[in-house]
Image (cartoon, helix red, strand yellow):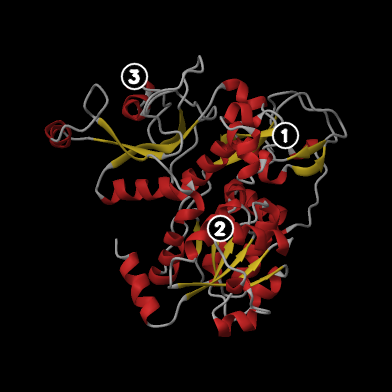
Amino acid sequence: MNLFKKLQERAALGNPIRIGMIGAGKFGTMFLAQALRIPAIHIVGVVDLIPANAKSNMKLAGWSDEAHSAVSLNDAAISGKTYVGDDWQAMITHPAVDIVIEATGNPLAAVTHCLAAFAQGKNVINVTVEADAFCGPGLAQKAAEAGVIYSMAYGDQPALASDLVDWARTCGFSVVAAGRGHKWLPHFRQSTPDTVWEHWGLTSEQAERGRLNPKMFNAFLDGSKPAIESAAIANATGLEAPENGLIFPPGGIDDIPTLMRPKSEGGVLERKGLVDVVSCLTREGEQIPYDIRKGVWVVFEADTEYLKNCFEEYKVVTDPSGKYMTLYKRWHMIGLELAVSVASVALRAEATGAAICFNADCAAVAKRDLAVGEMLDGEGGYTVSGGLRPAVSSVRQGNVPLGLAHNVPLIRAVKEGAAITWDDIKIDRTTDAYKLRTSMEEQLLK
């Protein structure tokens, strides 16, 4: 509630929050557009595999050439300008950087970047939720051991949903369920980068104008991103994953309290305390009015007669019993909201959501029959999508997390709809991500 005031105070001291960002794609560029407007934030460095692309995106977001004309990180620290380069290790180790923002979207690289930043005593805001979905608990543990902060990114739906859960619990409510919205029909599971725009609702021209990545957007459409983000929400809040995966019940915002209650009371949940996703389409494909497609929600209950009466007296929308209510944020603004994480980490020493447990997992599931020798292409691609699972059952079954099902060959055929297992693939066991994930699995099964 006081973050803006604290940012003003920090700016007045002439001591801005010093940021180093890895990756200048869509999310990162949106943040850079806003960072220009916040005097308390100094982007010391931006590193990208292709610095020219980063500079092009910065220009698109309103940056002048002068603003990112620093010739080195040292020059940036002294001049107040920004250095753009391709050496992430140099940026992480530079003393002028207080917080590292990981925004590559590459889960394997993200884990390596986060761990390296922790080793340098740097706080990390991880935009790459794909990494958090399968390594978040391990990353949070490593950050705690290093005495630094690891945070999810505000503006992305997991952090926003976790914020709503925190609000409800802080108010004394019992949380029944939480999650996000989505545009979902079952056949979207088979969508590929070739079909994404017709389902998404954009023309190819609009997608090109926005420099939108079809593989990334297809990860939203085919159910991978909802599963990834639901895993992150569960692990950050202590909620659990449904035994049989996400349900995607169709409904508008006012339907959420009725949908997200136990089956025994007329809802869709196996039990209380779960994450799930609400679809903005009927099963016939019709648009539902006042939807939550781009937002997040939490459902909580009036577990006493007094609370139930309060709901009634204040005319809030509930389920028919008057017992369940939802609070929601209808829109999320992606990187345009990331400064909330920056301010929270720097000024309050507080993450905007981070894993506190390993309750949920996002497993790689075959989109079609896959043959020996085929190369898995990760989220949003042609071969696999993500399926939410309880972590214990996923690990016991040897499921490969979606974040590690990229650029790995199959050594056994897999039928459509089956989860990929470790026995089905040949994987590089030397990566930081694989090592951290397997250590998490060992801890979980102890």
- Expressed as whole percent of the image width and height from the top left, the position of residue 437 reads 66, 51
Is residue 185 something one can see in this rendering?
yes
- Answer left or right for 49 relative to 165: right
Image: 388 above or below 42? above
Residue appearing at x 79%, y 35% in the figure: 424
Q: Amino acid at mark 2?
A: Ala
Q: Which residue is mark 1?
A: 420
Q: Which residue is mark 2?
A: 61
Label 2 residue SS? loop
Q: Quadrant of residue 179?
A: top left
In the foreground, 114 or 33: 33
Spatial CA distance of label 1 from label 3 is: 34 Å
Frontmost residue, 197 versus 279: 197
Residue 400 % position (x, y) = 70, 40
Quarter of image, res 257 = top left
Q: Earlier in the sequence, mark 2 or mark 3?
A: 2
Badge 3 is on which residue? 266
Q: In this orientation, which residue lies closer to the viewer: 351 or 428?
A: 351
What whole-number distance in Å separates the C-alpha atoms at marks 2 and 1?
40 Å
Mark 1 and mark 2 in contact (Cβ < 8 Å)? no
Q: How many marks?
A: 3
